[in-house]
């Protein structure tokens, strides 16, 4: 029987669940919207529903999985499986035992990591990061997150390394979701961009962002909404996205000057949606700030697409299945003492 | 006979040479001014003179040293021992085989690394970084340099990691010595501060910096000159140093948000001269920019003082002496095939 693993990418807007085999081929997948009301246990219930659906598609049951990996936003304690301060999820200001809850209800051991670290792992092992030993993953979406792999191993610092979205772009500048001022994310994260756009629209700026969102029946200015608006030449959207590119470029340059790392992989909802052209624009924005003594960096677009986060999560499950009971057949006797 | 090693810290204004024993006790030391004219071979000659003096003080000769470590500015190729683009040294724009030159003339194998990486290693092994496994060394002097140790090992990226002085502080701001604009170093490095101060004085700003430098017979505004001026309440000096503290604080916050590292050690000419009070001021400047999800950082003053760079350099010499020729006495025969 095939050894199957589960992977769940828990996002602010959707839950992506997959079941993969030992070669990381996707055998089943399901996407559920992330609950916008309730609390952590409602989110957990949706995760279980999504993974159960993916398992059924793969012709199995969650109980039969050797393990389930989860990439989660917020502050993740990988050892205990607790997740705290997941600000984009409903009622999740405190700490919740996500790991234990899932392990119990799925009937399979659960392994949780930060969503961005899981996404970076996915791109490193299976995607655009494959040729390299050390990579910086930069995820441009609702927020701006980063994951670091050094010499093949995830680098986590004291647990929270990689906050590239909170490198300082403009000291004393725009207020960030984290509470500080002038972070890269305050100028480039989708949530901050939407807040800024709605404020400008309220003040009289002309923009089709609201209209485009309505037409797509999206409550928020999703990546698709921003991409559409920019494509149509919407002035406000273009100006804000350009500002985001500039902020990411400066933050990326700072990160590269410090890390002098082999390769950068750019992913995330906006990153993937805007694609290669914007990867090149981010590099161009970084260039004037790159330390001249360093070799030029390698910056690539993430290649795993929408399932990258879930694939990275599935990779959190240890490769070797847990030690099995000894076989019934008696072992050969050792030839000498 | 004692196993002795040499260490040379090659700085922009002085060359510090020491001879240490196996327990890193300093057995001899000498300080020579760095030549301000000529080229790399003149600098090498001064290095040899300084180390020879230190060796004589230790009752030995450079030929008897098991190895000599060198911390050098510029772009250092540790494998070949070549040093390029050492902008603070005379006629050193190109590449020079410093390692081979020293090895030949000293009669002992030479090991070269970046000066800041050597300084970080010194503090990590013998100084303020001793209790930690991962540290960021921040050296505030002529420039602003950084060295990184992760899990006990130097982290060099592609060779040039740690350029914390070139993290972006103000995009498009003051011109930096590296050619870019708005780097931390452009606001905090002693060379940039002197350029800015002389410009302001020329424009009519009142300051005692020139007078203090003359009195000390220092051609440049050294760390001692800046410290004196600030102590005496010199307005321009205070304002510029305060600006430097702010820039370093912001850069440090960006570095910490990315690395989430165990400890930071602040050294360098200005860092050591201004001492603990300014370490606290740098931390206060960083605080509004630190990612709220991270634990508070540990930031300490370097503890090795003036010899820190040379001690770190001496640590570059491999701990075990090279394999010796087999002893004359025949080896015991192996008991079985």
Image (tube, coloured by chain):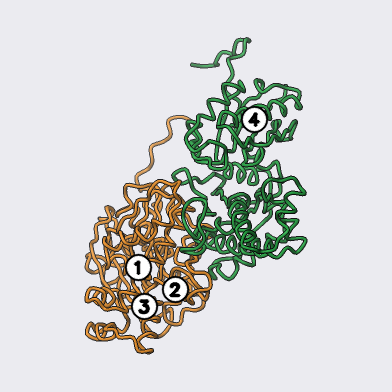
Chain colours: A green, B orange
> How far apart in space, not on screen, are marks 4 and 2 (Cα)?
52 Å
Q: Quadrant of residue B283?
A: bottom left
**SS at circle 1:** strand
Residue at 61% x, 62% y: name it: A203
Q: CA distance from mark 2 to mark 3?
A: 32 Å
The answer to which image quadrant residue B274 occupies is bottom left
For marks 3 and 1, the one nearer the N-term is 1
Q: Is residue A213 visible?
A: yes
> What residue is disc 2 on?
B186
Please state which of residues B284 and B27 is positioned toward the viewer in this rendering: B284
- Up the image or down, B5 lies above or below A215; here it is below
Nearest to the eye among marks 1 and 2: give it. 2
Location of residue B46 in the rendering, given as x and y in whole percent from the top left corner = 34, 77
The residue sitting at 22% across, 85% down in the picture is B215
Counting residues from the N terminus, which is met first, the one under dot 1 or under dot 2? 1
Callout 2 secondary element:
helix
Percent across and percent down for residue A18 are 70, 33
Q: Are marks 3 and 1 on the same chain?
A: yes
Percent position of residue A306, x then y:
71, 43
In the image, is residue B219 above or below residue B302? below
Query: At 31% across and 84% down in the image, what residue appears?
Result: B219
Q: Which residue is mark 3?
A: B45
Q: Tell me the chain of label 2.
A: B
Please tell me the numbered disc located at residue B9. 1
- For the residues labelled 4 and 3, the Cα–Cα distance comes to 72 Å
Looking at the rendering, which quadrant does residue B223 occupy? bottom left
Distance between mark 1 and mark 4 Cα atoms: 61 Å
User: Looking at the picture, how far across and down is residue B278, in whole percent?
Assistant: 29, 63
Residue A314 appears in the picture as rendered: no
Viewer-nearest of labels 2 and 3?
2
Q: Residue at left 45%, top 69%?
A: B100
Vertical order, A190 against A325 (above or below): below
């Amino acid at each position: 029987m095939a050894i199957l693993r589960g992977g769940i990418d828990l996002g602010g807007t959707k839950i992506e669940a997959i079941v993969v085999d030992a070669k990381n081929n996707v055998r089943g997948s399901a996407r559920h919207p992330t609950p916008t009301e309730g609390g952590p246990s409602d989110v957990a219930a949706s995760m279980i529903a999504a993974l159960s659906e993916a398992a059924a598609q793969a012709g199995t049951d969650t109980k039969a999985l050797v393990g389930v990996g989860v990439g989660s936003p917020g502050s993740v304690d990988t050892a205990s499986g607790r997740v705290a301060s997941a600000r984009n999820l409903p009622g999740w200001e405190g700490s919740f035992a996500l790991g234990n809850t899932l392990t119990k209800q799925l009937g399979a051991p659960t392994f949780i990591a930060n969503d961005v670290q899981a996404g970076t792992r996915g791109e490193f092992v299976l995607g655009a990061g494959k040729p390299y030993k050390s990579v910086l993953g930069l995820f441009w979406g609702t927020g701006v997150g980063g994951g670091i792999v050094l010499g093949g191993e995830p680098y986590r610092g004291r647990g929270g390394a990689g906050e590239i979205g909170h490198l300082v772009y403009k000291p004393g500048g725009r207020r960030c979701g984290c509470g500080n001022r002038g972070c890269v994310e305050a100028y480039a994260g989708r949530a901050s961009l939407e807040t800024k756009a709605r404020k400008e629209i309220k003040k009289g700026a002309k923009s089709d962002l609201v209209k485009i969102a309505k037409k797509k029946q999206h409550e928020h200015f999703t990546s698709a909404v921003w991409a559409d608006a920019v494509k149509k030449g919407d002035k406000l959207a273009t100006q804000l996205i350009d500002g985001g590119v500039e902020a990411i470029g400066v933050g990326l340059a700072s990160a590269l000057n410090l890390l002098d790392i082999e390769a950068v992989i750019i992913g995330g909802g906006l990153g993937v949606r805007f694609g290669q052209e914007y990867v090149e624009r981010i590099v161009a924005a970084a260039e004037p700030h790159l330390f001249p003594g360093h070799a030029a960096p390698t910056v690539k677009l993430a290649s795993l697409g929408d399932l990258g986060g879930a694939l990275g999560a599935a990779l959190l499950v240890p490769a070797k299945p847990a030690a099995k009971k000894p076989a019934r057949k008696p072992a050969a006797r050792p030839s000498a003492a």
